[in-house]
Image: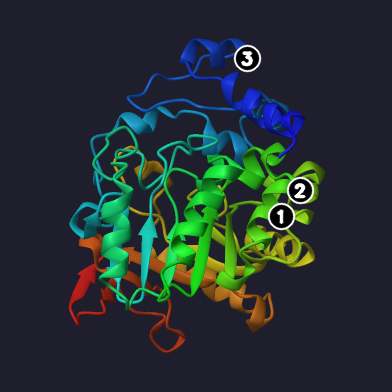
Amino acid sequence: MGQEDKMNWVEELRTAIKTNEELEAFLGCKIPKTPFSIFLPRNFAKKIKDMGPNSSLWKQFIPQVEENSPEGLIDPIGDQEFLKAPQLIHRYKNRALFLPTTICPVICRYCFRKNELSTQDLFLPRFKETLDYLLNNPQIEELIFSGGDPFILSDEKISFYLEEFKKISSLKFIRFHTRTPIILPSRITPNLAKTLNDYSSMKITIAIHVNHFEELDHEVEDAISKLKGINLISQTVLLKDVNDDPKILKELIHHLISLDIRPYYLHHPDKVKGGMNYYLDINRGREIYHSLRDEVPGWALFNYVVDLPGGKGKTPAFNPETFAFSGNLLGKDGNLYQY
């Protein structure tokens, strides 16, 4: 990586807005205090300020007074229950989550892991134990870099991890889940793309987290263009008063396809403590998805899923044959869950 490229995004992180006082001064208005951290790179904060309080960006990234509500779950999808080694969550038979960092390029106010990022339980850096677990569980074929955001790691650190995982013959696929191309596009450098392409034998996929077409400006599009040749998919969270409208989702899908990003997941929001203001009823989500199915081609349609409480895993949230029924969901274990 060129030193100039590295300093560009590292400097953006160093100078990010981190306190209520800084944010109030930057935006010129009062911001409610909450128990959760603030982290906003200033370039991205300017985009938020320019779009204003009614924009999807403001609603996702500026603290809301509702975050002080005691409602919701600390660990809504059962991370702790399925923590099998330091930095490793093994919930599904053939794939596991690797958590190499707690750091994100931004604090999303709806984040399902917002109560856990300030603890070290999921992120103890004992890498040998992680490698041992993977070696002893050859049924794991895909390793998913999550966190935190894995693209906050240096190119050298990413290369180190990929080199180590390449030695495990049972690992066939690597996936990165990231918001960095949207929030910190300066991080997506030619050298990062080269680093990833150097490990193309591991069938690398990048899942870009994007919730609204307003997030996809020319700067972001330019960053994503540097990732050509890598399999790009998207994940989107359905958020109340942000994108809970089939017209918004349709426009987002059209933008994604124009960037050669395949729409992949539409997540029903998790019942996370500090984020219940983004939650909407499952049947409302189904109505939105039902309308969306009539607006976009089947090959471009998200998979609409819900993560069941207690770590029961992702379950399809929509069945066209039973669309009209109540909020009960049938989990993979055969049990009904009220959601």
**Mark 2–mark 3 distance (CA, rounded to whole Å):** 32 Å
Q: Which residue is at 54% across, 12% downward?
A: 22
Question: Which residue is label 3 attached to?
Answer: 26
Question: Which residue is label 2 attached to?
Answer: 190
**Is 128 on the left-hand or right-hand side of 185?**
left
Q: Nearer the viewer, residue 293 or 219?
A: 219
User: In what element is the residue under mark 2?
Assistant: helix
Does 336 sit above or below residue 27?
Answer: below
Residue contact between numbered discs 2 and 1, judged by CB atoms under 8 Å: yes
Q: Nearer the viewer, mark 3 or mark 1?
A: 1
- Residue type, label 2: Pro
Residue 102, position as x, y percentages in the image: 40, 38
- Give the farthest residue toward the front: 167
**On-image quarter of the N terminus:** top right
Does 183 sit above or below residue 23?
Answer: below
Q: From where the camera sits, is residue 107 visible? A: yes
- Residue type, label 3: Phe
- Residue type, label 1: Lys
Q: From where the camera sits, is residue 238 visible? A: no
Q: Nearer the viewer, residue 223 or 169?
A: 169
Residue 181, position as x, y percentages in the image: 66, 46
**On-image quarter of the C terminus:** bottom left
Residue contact between numbered discs 2 and 3, judged by CB atoms under 8 Å: no
Q: Which mark is residue 236?
A: none
Q: Quick one: label 3, few (<14), some, or many (20+) residues within 10 Å?
A: some
Question: Which residue is label 1 attached to?
Answer: 194
